[in-house]
């Protein structure tokens, strides 16, 4: 089965850019979405189709996808950005959705 | 306002059955694919099942294939998940989620999530 690999944790200083990666075989051949889940809240879609932001999502969030790695970047990181982030893609060979294991973002 | 309200979460016995429901409002339910996504305690998100907007296409994770079924009643704006042959590893919060698209494909993304309902199998 298709697997997406994320680092378990990423730490960043306030105001800096946080970068979270998601790796999978030929991931760049499909589209990737990213979700933010703050403690006690339901997940929120922050990036879809690799780099598009839904309405209401801050411009500080951006995404890219190429080769075997997709990347979520958060510019000017703030304390409110602390959350678990999950990447997601569609596995065309098996026709189902796959999530990465999640990355805990800590703003120090 | 888009709302997804799950219900049916409960304590179930191994080998038993439970049925989850999700009442949708605030959007044209029949125009969008819907999914169930679960999160076991202390673990990450796991997609469980999805169904296209008209209900003609459904998909399942290998972990639930043959045990779970998904359906929708577009006249009632409601999504269902029938869970049979329950196992301890099915214990999780189950989220009802709305897709951005009518069909599932590489562009699928979940733009609205419910609050979740807890299923405990013990």
Image: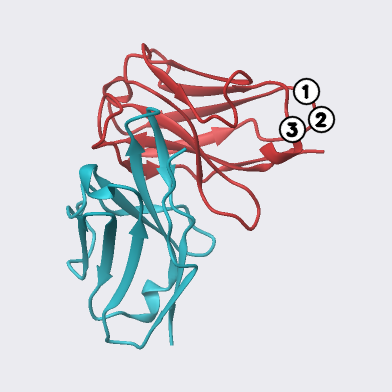
Label 1 in the same subunit as label 3: yes
- The chain that hosts pointer 1 is B
Q: Are marks 1 and 2 in contact (CB under 8 Å)?
A: yes
Residue at 33% x, 24% y: name it.
Answer: B29
Q: Residues within 10 Å of mark 3 (few under 14, many from 20)?
A: some
Q: Earlier in the sequence, mark 1 or mark 3?
A: 1
Estimate the x, y position of residue B44 in percent, counting from the top left. Answer: 54, 53
Report which quarter residue A96 is drawn in: top left
Q: Which residue is mark 3?
A: B87
Q: Which mark is residue B114?
A: none
Q: What residue sits right under mark 1 in the picture?
A: B16
Residue A12: horizontal and vertical position, in percent?
Answer: 37, 83
Q: Measuring 36% from the left and 47% from the top, which residue is drawn there? A: A88
Of all chains in the rendering, the one displayed in cyan is A
The chain carrying label 3 is B
Q: Is residue B26 left or right of residue A38?
A: left
Per the image, the residue denoted by label 2 is: B13
User: Where does residue B74 sit, x and y in percent of width and height?
Assistant: 38, 15
Q: Is residue B88 rendered to the left or right of residue A81? A: right
- Of all chains, the one bearing label 2 is B
């Amino acid at each position: 089965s298709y697997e997406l690999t994320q680092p378990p944790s990423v730490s960043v200083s306030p105001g800096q850019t946080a970068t979270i990666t998601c790796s999978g075989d030929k991931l760049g051949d499909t589209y990737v979405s990213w979700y933010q889940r703050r403690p006690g809240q339901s997940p929120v879609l922050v990036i879809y189709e690799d780099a598009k932001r839904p309405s209401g999502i801050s411009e500080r969030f951006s995404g890219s996808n190429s080769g075997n790695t997709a990347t979520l970047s958060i510019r000017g990181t703030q304390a409110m950005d602390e959350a678990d982030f999950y990447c997601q893609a569609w596995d065309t060979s098996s026709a189902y959705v796959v999530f990465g294991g999640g990355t805990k973002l800590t703003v120090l | 306002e888009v709302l997804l309200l799950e219900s049916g979460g409960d304590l179930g016995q191994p080998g038993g059955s439970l049925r989850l429901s999700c009442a949708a409002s605030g959007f044209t339910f029949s125009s969008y694919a819907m999914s169930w996504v679960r999160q076991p305690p202390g673990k990450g998100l796991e997609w469980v099942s999805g169904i296209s907007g008209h209900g003609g296409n459904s998909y399942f994770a290998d972990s639930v294939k043959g045990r779970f079924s998904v359906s929708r009643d577009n006249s009632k704006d409601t999504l269902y998940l029938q869970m049979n042959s329950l196992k301890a590893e099915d214990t999780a919060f189950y989220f009802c989620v709305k897709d951005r698209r009518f069909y599932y494909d590489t562009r699928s993304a979940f733009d609205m999530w419910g609050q979740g309902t807890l299923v405990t199998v013990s």
